[in-house]
Image (cartoon, rainbow, N blue to C red):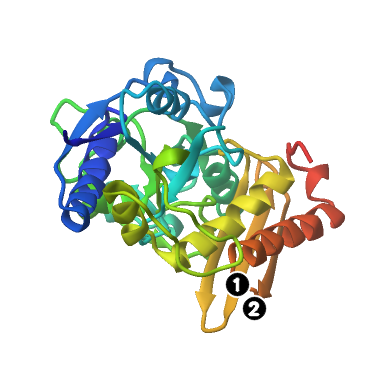
């Protein structure tokens, strides 16, 4: 029997799920098949915040796993709630793709060349807040839809249909998604993390499975132990540095009690013997923000978790919750 890979049905989800399925098949020596699952976020319209934020793209996939309708599920890690689901484990986090946000603008424009009053679309309060801080003279609009739908709202971008709406001057998207779809020709500017911090987990994928099928992963470090062909394949595609980085980012998010709809950015990376984490909390209107950084030499999941919690505590101590909608 092939290993059944649960995935959302969008072009991006199918592409990244097939890429991960191919990777698993290559190391595990088994066949795979994609199982399309419709999630609440695919069915309902409205902003992420109005739909409840984190979890709207995840719940149905988790139900499919627990109901034995698939064997693994592929998530964009930034969409995954920081609270786990009983009976399930994030068994693999492959090597992270580009973490950056990008601008896709008409006429090849960059952010500093967009005329005052230009309309820029994004569905992310984090991106919107940082855009407003960088360019308060722009009109930042909340938009939803798949990648092609959002790109279609900018006139003249390569690959857009002639009848696309073209009612915006630019949109901001994730570099990783465009790269996976082979659409990077639409990018007019890459935002480095010192300009716009990405969402916690951005660019990374989470491969979730039933805990009984997952490799055992020591929290204090060391190699995962795996029994069974699927568990061995999952252990083989897991990237230790990516897991450490996103563990720190998600621990920060959890301590702030902020979901994917909150104006919080975070980016961790390993440099030699240190794990560095930088984070920003913004007011939605872009008028206030607090950005801090911290590092640790504790290169274990426990060390990464502590790093995220400690930086979150610093943000809270310096008043982040006073201007941002955090649950902490």
Q: CA distance from mark 2 to mark 1?
A: 9 Å
**Residue designated by label 1:** 276
Label 2 neighbour load within 10 Å: few <14, some 14-19, many 20+:
some
**Residue designated by label 2:** 297
- Residues 122 and 238: in front is 238
* Res 170 quadrant in image: top left
**Where does residue 68 sit, x and y in percent of width and height?**
35, 24
Sooner in the amino-acid sequence: mark 2 or mark 1: 1
Instruction: Report the number of discs.
Output: 2
**Where does residue 142 sit, x and y in percent of width and height?**
49, 30
Answer left or right for 223 relative to 72. right
On residue 155, which mark appears?
A: none
**On-image quarter of the N terminus:** top left
Above or below: residue 272 compared with residue 248? below
In this view, which residue lies farthest toward the top? 44
- Residues 135 and 185: in front is 185
Label 1 neighbour load within 10 Å: few <14, some 14-19, many 20+:
many
Answer left or right for 221 relative to 19. right
- Residue 155 in sight here: yes
**On-image quarter of the C terminus:** top right
**Where does residue 287 sit, x and y in percent of width and height?**
71, 48
- Residue 117 in sight here: no
Helix, strand or loop for disc 1: strand
Above or below: residue 322 compared with residue 63? below
- Residues 137 and 296: in front is 296
Helix, strand or loop for disc 2: loop
- Residues 215 and 133: in front is 215
Name the residue rendered at 39%, 40% in the picture.
Answer: 75
Name the residue rendered at 52%, 33% in the picture.
Answer: 87
């Amino acid at each position: 029997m092939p290993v059944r890979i649960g995935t959302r049905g969008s072009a991006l989800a199918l592409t990244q799920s097939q890429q991960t399925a191919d990777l698993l098949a290559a190391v595990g020596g088994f066949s795979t098949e994609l199982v399309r699952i419709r999630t609440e976020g695919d069915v309902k319209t409205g902003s992420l915040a109005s739909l409840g934020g984190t979890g709207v793209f995840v719940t149905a996939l988790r139900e499919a796993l627990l109901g034995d309708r698939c064997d693994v599920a592929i998530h964009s890690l930034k969409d995954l709630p920081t609270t786990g689901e009983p009976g399930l484990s994030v068994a693999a986090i492959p090597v992270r793709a580009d973490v950056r946000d990008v601008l896709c603008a008409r006429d090849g424009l960059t952010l500093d060349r967009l005329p005052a009053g230009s309309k820029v679309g994004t569905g992310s309060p984090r991106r919107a807040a940082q855009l407003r801080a960088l360019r308060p003279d722009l009109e930042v609009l909340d938009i939803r839809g798949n990648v092609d739908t959002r790109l279609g709202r900018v006139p003249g971008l390569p690959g857009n249909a002639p009848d696309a709406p073209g009612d915006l001057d630019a949109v901001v998207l994730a570099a990783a998604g465009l790269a996976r779809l082979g659409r990077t020709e639409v990018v007019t500017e890459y935002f480095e993390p010192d300009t716009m911090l990405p969402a916690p987990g951005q660019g990374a994928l989470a491969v979730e499975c039933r805990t009984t099928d997952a490799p055992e992963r020591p929290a204090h470090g060391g190699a995962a132990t795996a029994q069974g062909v699927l568990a061995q394949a999952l252990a083989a595609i897991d990237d230790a540095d990516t897991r450490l980085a996103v563990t720190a980012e998600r621990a920060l998010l959890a301590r702030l009690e902020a979901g994917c709809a909150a104006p919080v950015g975070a980016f961790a990376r390993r440099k030699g013997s240190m794990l560095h984490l930088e984070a920003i909390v913004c007011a939605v209107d872009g008028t206030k923000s607090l950005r801090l950084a911290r590092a640790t030499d504790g290169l274990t999941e426990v060390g990464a978790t502590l790093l995220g919690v400690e930086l979150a505590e610093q943000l809270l101590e310096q008043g982040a919750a006073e201007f941002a909608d955090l649950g902490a």
